[in-house]
Image: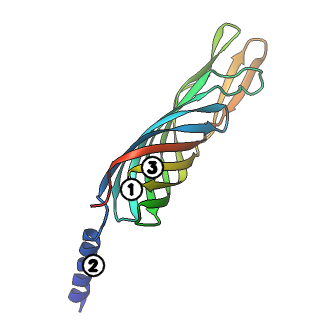
Amino acid sequence: MKKIILLAVVVLVFSAADAQDYKKFKVGIGLGYGVPNEGSGGVLLYLEPMYRITDQIAAGLRIESAAFLGKPISGTPYTTSAFGVGSYTLNGQYYFSNNTFRPFVGAGFGMFTLAAASADIGGSNVNLNAAATVFGFYPRIGFDLGHFNLSIDYNVIPSQETTVSIGGFGTTTTTSNYSYIGFRIGGSIGGGKK
């Protein structure tokens, strides 16, 4: 009896794998607009290779680079000129349909690299924080429409604290929050119906 059950499970697994309507691999590429918790919006670029485990479940890697405009330096009237965030994350998505329009939800986690930030204050270059790599995560929603992709995610990155000495203001401790919302639009190569 155990052999019959084991054989039935093996047949179901292989028939489920063969029953997929979509190709296993796809690579998403695109750009977007980021809205940080602190500072002004900026641009982001991403590359996202994915593997479909089933038609409804996909797992992948997101490689992203984002650049944002200035953010305020707490305790002073000054702002930074720009700051950047890069990320290498693992993610997963669950698709709600097998039609041409495929809404999904997902989440990802991984390493976020924060670029060193500085500001020009009274002709002096002041370092606000050093480059750092931290662990972060993001929930996401979006949809695929054929090979067109649109998604929104909220990248949760731990705040970083830095002590800065600014002439005329003394020493101040700044806390920088690098979390941001990303609006992405792009296309995918592969991953379509067989």
Q: Earlier in the sequence, mark 3 or mark 2?
A: 2
* Location of residue 51 with respect to 11 vertically, above or below: above
The residue at the point 45 percent across, 58 percent down is 93
The residue at the point 44 percent across, 43 percent down is 186
Work out whether residue 107 can be spotted: yes
Marks 1 and 2, Cα distance to the nearest angstrom?
Answer: 22 Å
Marks 3 and 1, Cα distance to the nearest angstrom?
Answer: 16 Å
The residue at the point 56 percent across, 43 percent down is 182
Which label is found at residue 154? none
The residue under label 2 is 12
Q: Nearer the viewer, mark 3 or mark 1?
A: 3
* Location of residue 82 with respect to 37 vertically, above or below: above
Residue flagged by tag 2: what amino acid is it? Leu
Local secondary structure at mark 3: strand
Local secondary structure at mark 2: helix
Residue flagged by tag 1: what amino acid is it? Ala
Which residue is most to the top?
A: 123
Q: Earlier in the sequence, mark 3 or mark 1?
A: 1
Residue flagged by tag 3: what amino acid is it? Asn
The residue under label 3 is 149
* Location of residue 129 with respect to 142 vertically, above or below: above
Check contact, mark 1 vs mark 2: CB within 8 A: no
* Location of residue 10 with respect to 140 vertically, above or below: below
